């Protein structure tokens, strides 16, 4: 199964949104023919009705099934009331052919901070207990500090409790965004993966606009970072689900700034 993991699109009518980059990114995503497109939040910049309308219209050009959770920007200005109207439930468990996806809203209205809370922790546990497929968790904020993304802020405030549930249950994959740089790290038997920003002009150093391709096979998860501007694919991580071994090329020079 192939997942295109997209994050931080930041559609708006001001300076945040790079429309040309978005269109180029969509073209590349469509060529990769993903089975699922997971969008980990910040589809808009200020959660405005006009931005939601533009985001919805823009996403129609992305071919394939989509699962979407909101980010902190989407919850600004009562945007949290608009999200379900445009993109469905902000928190969900969805079954696909090969995975169970638990999608979680990690934001609080009008705050940049992230928090899951007891209710969403219970949903993670419910998704794990289903045991029909591999369970993957996805939300906007980051669970561990992300290198090359500036001073730490907005990490989910119950990161310790969330990590404990995820690591204890050996959830193989967690997908996140928010910090505008791609990153991945294996902790215990879990791969934590952050997507960079798909089409926001607020990029960091030379990271540019990127998305992640996640290829899930029976015994292996491969994460590839796609640089939209340079049209380059870089394999970042190979994680062997059977023996727990992990090759992480993030720290090779060609991935770093
Ligand atoms: Fe964000």
Image (cartoon, grey):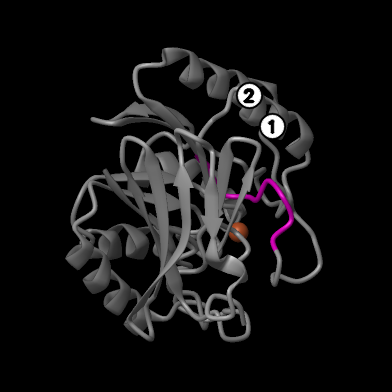
Residue at left offset 68%, top offset 51%: 110
| x, y percent for residue 142 | 65, 50
Q: Are marks 2 and 1 in contact (CB under 8 Å)?
A: yes
Asked if residue 156 shows in the view, the reply is yes
In the picture of the structure, the residue carrying the numbered disc 2 is: 121
Quadrant of the snapshot with the N terminus: top left
User: Which quadrant of the structure image shows residue 20?
Assistant: bottom left
Say whether residue 189 is left or right of residue 40. Answer: right
Q: Is residue 99 above or below residue 26?
A: above
In the picture of the structure, the residue carrying the numbered disc 1 is: 162
Say whether residue 200 is left or right of residue 168. Answer: left
Quadrant of the snapshot with the C terminus: bottom right
Residues rendered magenta in the picture: 138-146
Residue at left offset 57%, top offset 79%: 203
| x, y percent for residue 174 | 53, 42
If the picture is divided into quarters, which one holds ligand 1? bottom right
- Secondary element under disc 2, as helix, strand or loop, is helix
- Secondary element under disc 1, as helix, strand or loop, is helix
Residue at left offset 55%, top offset 79%: 207
């Amino acid at each position: 199964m192939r997942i295109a993991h997209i994050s931080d699109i930041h559609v708006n009518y001001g300076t945040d949104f790079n429309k040309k980059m978005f269109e180029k990114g969509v073209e590349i995503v469509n060529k990769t023919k993903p089975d699922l497109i997971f969008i980990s939040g910040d589809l808009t910049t200020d959660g405005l009705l006009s931005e939601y309308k533009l985001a919805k219209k823009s996403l129609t050009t992305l071919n394939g099934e989509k699962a979407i959770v909101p980010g902190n920007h989407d919850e600004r200005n009562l945007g949290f009331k608009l999200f379900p109207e445009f993109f469905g439930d902000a928190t969900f468990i969805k079954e696909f052919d090969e995975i169970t996806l638990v999608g979680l809203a990690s934001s609080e209205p009008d705050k940049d901070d992230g928090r899951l809370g007891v209710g969403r922790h219970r949903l993670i546990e419910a998704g794990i207990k289903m045991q029909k497929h591999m369970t993957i968790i996805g939300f906007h904020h980051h669970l561990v500090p992300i290198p090359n993304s500036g001073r730490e802020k907005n990490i989910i405030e119950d990161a310790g409790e969330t990590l404990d549930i995820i690591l204890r249950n050996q959830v193989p994959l967690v997908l996140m965004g928010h910090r505008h740089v791609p990153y991945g790290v294996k902790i215990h038997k879990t791969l934590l993966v952050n997507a960079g920003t798909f089409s926001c002009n607020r990029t960091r150093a030379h990271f540019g606009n990127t998305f992640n391709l996640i290829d899930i096979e029976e015994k292996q998860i491969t994460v590839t970072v796609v640089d939209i501007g340079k049209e380059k694919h870089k394999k970042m991580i190979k994680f062997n689900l059977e023996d727990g071994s992990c090759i992480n090329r993030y720290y090779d020079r060609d991935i770093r700034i």
